[in-house]
Image: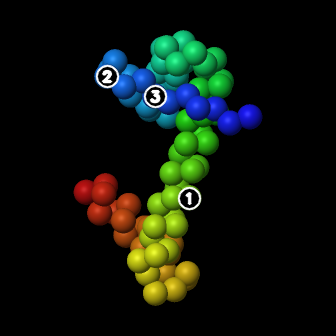
Amino acid sequence: MTSTRRWPNGDGLQPPDANDTSAYAEVAPALGLSESGLRSAVHRMRRRYGELVREEVAQTVGSPAEVDEEIRYLIRVVAG
């Protein structure tokens, strides 16, 4: 079953920080999810985001072997 739930807009909720376990407990009820359901949803979103980034990066390099190197470079640039 695919969920169509989305993060609420305009109410100040932000995706919880993976290191802040209390954030999941606070946000989950507002989304109509259990804490474990929210953790699963966040995990799936992060995994899908990684897949999408990998696909986009793959379109910008000359060979599949360069994808990981380019992603490492991207992370360094974004991290500052």
Indicate the position of residue 37 as horizontal and vertical percent values. 65, 25
Amino acid type for the residue under numbered disc 1: Glu
Residue 28, x across and y down, in percent: 54, 18
Mark nearest the camera among 2 and 1 is 2
- Work out whether 69 lies above or below 18: below
Q: Which residue does the image show at 59% across and 26% down from the upper left?
A: 38
Q: Inspect the image, locate mark 2, and give the three-letter code of the amino acid beneath it.
A: Gly
Q: Which residue is mark 3?
A: 7
**Please, which residue is most extreme toward the right here?**
1
* Quarter-of-image position of residue 36: top right
Q: Secondary structure at mark 1?
A: helix
Q: What residue appears at the point 50 percent right and 30 percent down from the top-left corner?
A: 6
Q: How many marks?
A: 3
Near-viewer residue (18 or 52): 52
Whether tag 2 and tag 3 are in contact, CB under 8 A, the answer is no
User: Where residue 39 sits: x, y (%)?
Assistant: 60, 30
Name the residue nearer the viewer: 72 or 62. 62
Colouring mode (rainbow / by chain / secondary structure / one colour): rainbow
Q: Residue at x 49, y 81 (%)?
A: 66
